[in-house]
Image (spheres, rainbow, N blue to C red):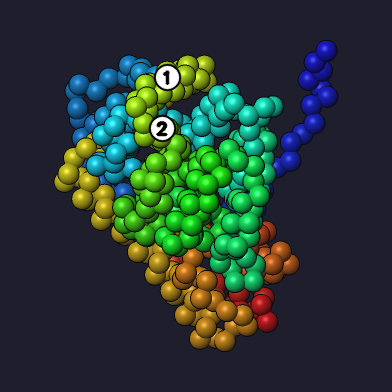
Amino acid sequence: VFTPAAVAAAPEDPLFGLMKAYREDPSDKKVDLGIGAYRDNNAKPWILPVVKKADDAIHNDPSVNHEYLSIGGLADFTSAAQKLIVGADSPAIREKRICTLQTISGTGAVHLGGLFLSKFHPAQPKPTIYLSNPTWANHNQIFTNVGLTLAKYPYFSAKTKGLDFDGMIAALRAAPAGSIILLHACAHNPTGVDPSQEQWKQIAALMRERRQFPFFDTAYQGFASGDLVRDAWAIRYFVEQGFELCVAQSFAKNFGLYGERTGAFHFVSAPGADASTAIQHIASQLAILQRSEISNPPAYGARIASKVLNDPVLFAEWEEDLRTMSGRIQEMRRGLRERLEKRGTPGTWDHITTQIGMFSFTGLNENQVKILRDKWHVYMTKNGRISMAGLNTHNLDYFAEAVDSVVR
Ligand code: PMP
């Protein structure tokens, strides 16, 4: 029998615990480097001007109502999301071998993809999905919940604070043929370390040889480098190489639409005579899964993103907003590195500027992180990850001083 009283309390989510401790700290010096959302130079949330514009236009549009979207979501949104990630001239679109469903942001897309693979991947009892070590913590929970078997591949080298490429390649080589490999398309969370284009080519060649299935997670397109095409390079390369693959796409970061839960899941089948029939079958099965989980996705964020993605003038303004966000973050990276190097802080700090995106793996250890919190009121996760978005011109000197002091 089910005895509700026997349900043990779950451990607190470490990130939410960190946020709570930050909120409750009365110090006026406190710095929040845990947050996974963009902040402006005054540590405030930033509504992208183009999002405000699209939002106002939707608000004043008398034809907008509150009906359900279809199971697959807003068609103008899913087609635009598709073009954005694989490229408007992608062979996958031309050959009608890509399908897209709107999802509950990136998390929902990762989940839908995991659920689909868990049900339809022929491996028995269940396929194994290889995750980078480390990875976004939620990957572990999501893929466990849908019953996939989890394995890890080495990713971060503590020594170079860059990519452990040899370790990664060796693990992929050893992974059983047909395994699912989760890849962060750009701005790897939590390390900020990405393979170079040359390394991506080698990863693709090996995965092709081993007939492995790429599952791309893209949460930072345009937010990482400021260039939408560049940040989609790896995915487009794999598609060009003829892979069968899937993509979980989030619009939380690049549109600043965190709470609107705007995302998409794409499945691309390999080129071939029956590719477009295969994709129709896959789309029909994905629709059934979606129906049982959420019935139909939320409209609001998709309307905003769709308006921007489908209007060339608004699209250009969006690219400008992306450059504002990524530019400020890159400036903070340069500023932090410069300050640490100027102080002669022990260690090397070039990784602060070679890493990319929202996060940086500083190399600070758990004890140093604890002193930063207890003595300096600086909040970050135990693994030494900082959110670059939490730094600004008002706290950069203070943070550099704090790091210098705990490293010495
Ligand atoms: N994947 C990765 C790697 C992420 O960093 C995030 C955001 N933290 C997501 C997926 C999903 O975020 P959301 O559900 O808010 O789109």
Residue located 30% across and 29% down the image = 96
Image coords of residue 116 (percent x, y):
53, 26
Disc 2 residue crowd, few under 14, some 14–19, many 20+, Cα 10 Å: many
Quadrant for residue 191, please give it. bottom right
Disc 1 residue crowd, few under 14, some 14–19, many 20+, Cα 10 Å: few
In the image, the residue with mark 1 has its CB under 8 Å from the nearest atom of ligand 1: no
User: In the structure shown, which secondary structural element does the residue marked by tag 2 occupy?
Assistant: loop
Residue located 53% across and 51% down the image = 206
Residue of label 2: 269
Q: CA distance from mark 1 to mark 2?
A: 11 Å
Residue located 71% across and 64% down the image = 366
* Residue 292 to residue 106: above or below: above
Image coords of residue 257 (percent x, y):
39, 41
Left/right placement of residue 51 relative to residue 133 reads: left
Image coords of residue 387 (percent x, y):
52, 59
Quadrant for residue 6, please give it. top right
User: In the structure shown, which secondary structural element does the residue marked by tag 1 occupy?
Assistant: helix
* Residue 66 to residue 166: above or below: above
Residue type for callout 2: Ser
Left/right placement of residue 125 relative to residue 256 reads: right
Viewer can see residue 403: yes
Quadrant containing the N terminus in the rendered view: top right
Mark identifier at residue 281: 1
Viewer can see residue 19: no
